[in-house]
Amino acid sequence: MIRRIGGWVGPLAFVAAAWAWSTAAIAQEPAVEAARARARENPRDADAQLALGHVLRRAGRFAEAATQMTKAARLRRGWEQGLYDVARVYFDQGDYRRARTACGALARVSKQGVAHHACMARTYLVWNRTDRALEEADAALAVDAQSALAHVARADAFRLRADVAQAEPAYRRAAELAPQDVEPHLGLGRLYAAANRRDDAVRAFRRALELDGDNPEVAYELGRLLGNDAEALALLQRAVTGRPTWPQAQVSLGEALLRGGQNEAALAAFQQAVRLSDSLARAHLGIGNAQLALNRPQEAEAALQRSLALVQDLPETHMALGDVYARTERPEEALEAYRRSFDRDPSNPESLLRAARLCVSLRRTTMAAAVLTRLLDAHATHAPALALASEVAESRGETASAIQLAERALRGTGTIDRRAVEARLRALRARAGATRSGSTQPPRR
């Protein structure tokens, strides 16, 4: 019977982000070599051979891991755990055909078919076939209601359907059955993160990290969720150290570095992501943003055009191109790029806010007012837009409107310079009061 869900082993190291690739590979290599040495010393020890496969899988060296785990599984006849772990590698790679073949080997040895059904459930999830996955998971549970593997597979299927009510108890049941395993908590964290239950997601990921502090997937998920602080950066660095060949982790690390103003280090991470996967649009977007932050607009534009060629509808790419055009004195192109960005993601007001600020800088107050009207139609309480709209109204001599907008800005959401807005509001009210007072004085004789 298979009892373990996770089972990855191996130390990680904290690395300087500017050397995210070379240093990470060096830091990760001792774990591989140590496991390889143990495997060489014990060539007939199935556990030692499988442990090497786990370390290789953790490091993202999937082809080697599959070969090694296959070798380990052959050393122990009818070994469900070893055969299932071969399939895991193919789950990671999204290789449905090979995963199905690996599960077929389990069918010949799995007692009552529990491990085979659980394996096929995970295989169907590679293609997002949740109906078939649930059929297989339920078949496993009909034989063995204590199968943690089947409960996790069932929970994953419901998570892919965004069905929190069904996925949550399934993950919790798996965690009860396998209290030392990471996967139920990792799955719960992903479920809560997708449902915008951030605090619950953080708790789940932290529990997973307690169980396996060296797991790069857990470090990646928690680091992305925490955002812009030292812990998030350390976790993302840990993720790329543990799996140096993971381009998405390199991108997330680059984004965290960029938010922290470490532009050169961010650029290095994004460039490494491109070396690993040139077709990753967000990596080219990151290069563009980093190059622009380093005041290299030509290099930024080239990277952003590459991102756009890969994914035309990525709103962040259009917004970044707007920034490039604004920086290089191409206002019409900038305004159009900002508009395209907002059209693709109306939930983000930032692109139209940048467009309005550009209009103000060009003294196109009528156009600025029109842009801000569209923004505020979608985001009525957005304080930065309300504050800017107040300034635009004031510049056009619309004092009453400027007062109303400033008052709304102070009640709105988002970061503004409250003292500046309050000071301008006092001045506007004083001006309005003086105007009313002057208009009621009797004419001089």
Image (cartoon, rainbow, N blue to C red):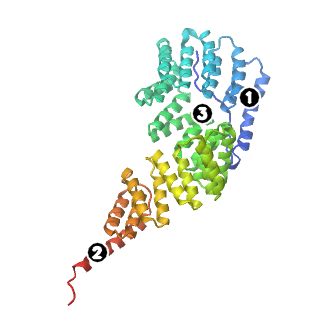
- Label 2, residues with CA under 10 Å away: few <14, some 14-19, many ≥20: few
Ranked by sequence position, the earlier of labels 2 and 1 is 1
Tag 2 residue: 433
Q: Is residue 253 visible?
A: no
Q: Position of residue 85 (x, y in %)?
A: 63, 21
- Helix, strand or loop at mark 2: helix
Looking at the image, residue 165 lies above or below residue 86: below
Position of 32 compared to 220: left or right?
right
Amino acid on which disc 3 is placed: Asp
Ranked by sequence position, the earlier of labels 1 and 3 is 1
Q: Position of residue 73 (x, y in %)?
A: 69, 16
Amino acid on which disc 1 is placed: Ala
Tag 1 residue: 35
Work out how far the residue at label 1 is from the one at label 3, CA to CA, in angstroms: 18 Å
Q: At 57% from the left edge and 57% from the top edge, which residue is drawn?
A: 325
Work out how far the residue at label 2 is from the one at label 1, CA to CA, in angstroms: 80 Å
Frontmost residue, 3 versus 244: 244
Q: Position of residue 273 (x, y in %)?
A: 66, 42
* Corner quadrant of residue 50: top right
Q: At 22% from the left edge and 88% from the top edge, which residue is drawn?
A: 444
Residue at the extreme front of the image, as rendered = 332
Circle 2 or circle 1, nearest the eye = 2
Tag 3 residue: 212
- Label 1, residues with CA under 10 Å away: few <14, some 14-19, many ≥20: many
* Corner quadrant of residue 29: top right
Residue at the extreme bottom of the image, as rendered = 445
- Helix, strand or loop at mark 3: loop
Residue at the extreme right of the image, as rendered = 41
Frontmost residue, 377 versus 134: 377
Position of 337 compared to 411: left or right?
right
Ranked by sequence position, the earlier of labels 3 and 2 is 3
Amino acid on which disc 2 is placed: Gly
